[in-house]
Image: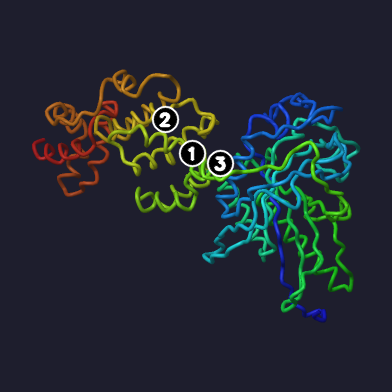
Amino acid sequence: MVTITKDTTFEVVIGIEVHAQLKTKTKLFGASSTQFGDKPNSNVDPVCLGLPGALPVLNKESTKMAVLAGLALNCDIRKTSVFSRKNYFYPDLPKGYQISQFDKPICEHGHLDINVDGVEKRIGITRIHMEEDAGKLNHQGADSIEGATHSLVDLNRAGTPLIEIVSEPDIRSSAEARAYVEALKTIVQHIGVCDGNMEEGSLRADANVSIRPVGQKEFGTRTEIKNLNSFRSLERAINVEVKRQKEVILAGGKIVQETRNYDDNSQTTTSLRGKEEAHDYRYFPEPDLPPLIISDEQLAEYKALLPELPEQKKSRYINDYQLSKHDVKVFIQDVSTDHFFNNVLANVKKATAKDVAKWVVGDLSAALKDSQSNFEATTLQPQRFAELMDLIAAGTISGKMGKQVLDELLKSDKTAQAIVDGLGGGQISDESALEDVVINILKSNMDVVEKIKAGKTQSANFLMGQVMKETKGRAKPDTVRELILKLVTTI
């Protein structure tokens, strides 16, 4: 052991447990819905309520999703895994035990690579196990359990299928912890096993934090900070707890192994309860469920279902599509935007991926934001947007007119072509059709004409705007500019 002095430098050691709610329609062992936001205690069934005689039946879809997560995180998939009863008593756990996996989890020995400030690091993943969620306590009289006068129990979440992803204690800073959870969230979203909605509790992180003097091999005593549901809270909570632990140790005290709550308002962690060990939960194999066996054929089937992973997709977008780093970042971080982009690409005939990305990330995103919508909620079908992209790519309409068409697409169910027809037709690129309009604009703005004749060709931009206004945005800008510069000498 290293002797502690006021000048001692400490190393932070962090392990993260991430609970990811699987995107199944029904619960892990019962038939009730997993829909979020329904009336409290409306999505319940005899199994999740722990009614006498109710027997669990494993949700097959949850097994597939757990294996997909394991494959995406480079884990070994256990051919035979076992469910156990984890016994504890809490108001939101009707049975008095949670069905989980203990000594034989479905996935083990994986890893995830992260990047912090340009430095790559590999974080080991100890295990991924399946378990059912508990219900939710809605604390009354305060924003959190601290200060609450009483709590109401909502069992809608009880029995919801989870995977718990447990890292090795390889993380050495709050920034690394954040990068790790961000990367995990991106992966589970892109492979379609979890929506990653931290605000709704679909993805929650527990941080196990300890410190030790630099050079000491033995780990320090750890504390667990529970239910961190944002990246900011995760980072802040770790920093606050590290500071607290340093102060305790430097004052001659000892860290107690316990579970702590983080309060973002006060920037403090407070003790919730003593940290339980495995023997405290009295684990034993679930007698009502047989071992979960995954055959070679099933595993091969699941491997074939594994979609492209975020890092692979990022590389393809940059190398094959030549997308900007900004656009790629948007697509990787927002799955609904990425899905829309790919669905549009599957329907375009002339537009390039770069063209589509520019409009999806730019004008369409802005229009949806202005209407307080998003890519998940929009009624705009990718096929209709693809038609607009092709009209612009073919030169049938200008980009400026494309924005008008987009506004109408979002307000109606008309096709892009029908909207263009309603606006008077497509882009006018024929010089003969534009010549009279340009001449009239020139004659009405002789002061600008004289500036152009004097060599100030940038003044043509004003006249271009007048022509576009006169033609309701249908004139082809390049053609208009050429005509202005050609005809100005004849006026």
Tag count in the figure? 3
Q: Residues within 10 Å of mark 2 (few under 14, many from 20)?
A: some
Q: From the viewer's side, name the closer residue of 95 and 370.
A: 95
- Residue 143, position as x, y percentages in the image: 80, 41
Mark 1 and mark 2 lie on one chain; the one further toward the N terminus is 1
- At x 86%, y 49%, the residue is 281
The type of residue carrying mark 1 is Thr
- Residue 129, position as x, y percentages in the image: 69, 48
From the viewer's perspective, is the residue at label 3 or at label 1 nearer? 3
| Residue wearing tag 3 | 298
Secondary structure of residue under mark 2: helix
Secondary structure of residue under mark 3: helix
Asked whether, in this view, residue 90 is left or right of residue 267, the answer is right
The type of residue carrying mark 2 is Pro
Q: From the viewer's side, name the closer residue of 274 and 456.
A: 274
Which quadrant holds the C terminus?
A: top left
Vertical placement of residue 264 versus 352, above or below: below
Asked whether, in this view, residue 30 is left or right of residue 378, the answer is right
Q: From the viewer's side, name the closer residue of 153 and 303.
A: 303
Asked whether, in this view, residue 334 is left or right of residue 451, the answer is right
| Residue wearing tag 1 | 337
Secondary structure of residue under mark 1: helix
- At x 48%, y 43%, the residue is 304
Residue 34 in which image quadrant: top right
| Residue wearing tag 2 | 382
- Residue 314, position as x, y percentages in the image: 44, 51
Asked whether, in this view, residue 144 is left or right of residue 383, the answer is right
